[in-house]
């Protein structure tokens, strides 16, 4: 875009970060309980960490801790309904990335849990995202990380 | 709260684009059919509230706890 830098410095929970403008993810419906926030970026908490910050571009205080669930739960299965697939403009399963929100009980990082009932689904090609509630009764609502097998690989770096 | 009585097979319109139909009643369970615009999301209340709560917990993590958790699970990754 003429006259616009490809980079953007935003304030986040982890301080100022420089982001690429084309790394911004658009959430047409926002997130649940945050439906007026549309633009987010993924920021790595630190190198090789499975945790990422899903940071709202326009609100520095609004950064959700998320993680790639698959190093911990290789069999985690997410179901998307047809309208959700349409909203995400899914053409191929290879465009899809899944993240889950993370809860760290105050001052007890060892009791960190992954929340499995509200995964955040990204179309990494179209750079679209949504939160897709899962209603599978067999799916636990959360998963304690210290009950996990050792992760098999660190989370991929955000693009 | 608006209260209306409906029998199985009867419907309600919420505005022009949302139709809510009582399909059947079996014991304590009522089966509802919804016709809503494609871009409208429908949530079960308990699922919606739980996810909303989890989102706010994911927001509240202090920077200190966040970095501590990152260290904890980063070491796990290294050990594997």
Image (spheres, helix red, strand yellow):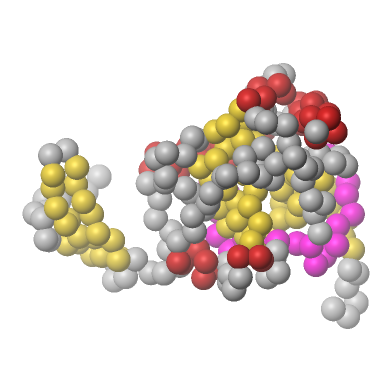
Q: Nearer the viewer, residue A154 or A115?
A: A154
> Is any part of residue A59 visible from this angle?
no
The answer to which of A43 and A13 lies nearer the viewer is A43
Question: Is residue A81 rendered magenta in the image?
Answer: no
Quadrant of the image for the N terminus of chain A?
A: bottom right
Note whether B72 is above or below A118 in the view shown. Answer: above
Q: Using residue B1 as the reference point, say whether residue B80 is left or right of it.
A: right
Query: Looking at the picture, how far across and down is residue A114, in whole percent?
Result: 62, 35
Horizontal and vertical percent position of residue A56:
71, 51
Up-down relation of residue A40 to residue A87 (above or below)? above
Res A107 visible: yes
Most extreme residue toward the bottom is A2
Residue found at the very far top of the displayed protein: A107
> Horizontal placement of B75 versus A54: left or right?
right
Establish if B74 lies above or below A67.
Answer: above
- In this image, B47 relative to A90: left or right? left
**Magenta segment range?**
A14-36
- At horizontal 68% and vertical 31% (from top left) the residue drawn is A149
| Residue at 61% from the left image edge and 70% from the top image edge | A92
Residue at x-position 70% and y-position 69%: A125
């Amino acid at each position: 875009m003429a006259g616009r830098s490809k980079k953007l410095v935003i304030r986040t929970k982890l301080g100022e970060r420089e982001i690429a403008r084309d790394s911004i993810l658009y959430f047409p419906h926002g997130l649940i309980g945050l439906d007026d926030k549309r633009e987010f970026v993924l920021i790595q908490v630190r190198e090789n960490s499975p945790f990422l910050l899903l940071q709202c571009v326009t609100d520095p205080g609004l950064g959700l801790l998320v993680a790639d669930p698959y190093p911990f739960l290789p069999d985690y299965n997410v179901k998307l309904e047809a309208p959700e697939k349409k909203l995400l403009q899914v053409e191929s399963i290879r465009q899809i990335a899944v993240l889950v929100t993370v809860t760290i009980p105050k001052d007890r990082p060892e009791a960190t849990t992954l929340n499995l009932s509200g995964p955040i689904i990204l179309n990494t090609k179209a750079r679209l995202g949504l939160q897709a509630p899962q209603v599978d009764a067999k799916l636990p609502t959360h998963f304690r990380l210290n009950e996990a097998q050792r992760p098999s690989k660190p989370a991929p770096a955000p693009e | 709260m608006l209260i209306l009585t409906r029998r199985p097979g009867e419907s309600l319109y919420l505005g022009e684009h949302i139709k809510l139909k009582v399909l059947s009643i079996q014991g304590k369970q009522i089966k509802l059919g919804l016709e809503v615009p494609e871009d409208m999301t429908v949530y079960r209340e308990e699922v919606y509230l739980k996810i909303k709560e989890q989102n706010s917990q994911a927001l509240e993590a202090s920077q200190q706890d966040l970095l501590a958790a990152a260290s904890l699970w980063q070491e796990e990754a290294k050990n594997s």
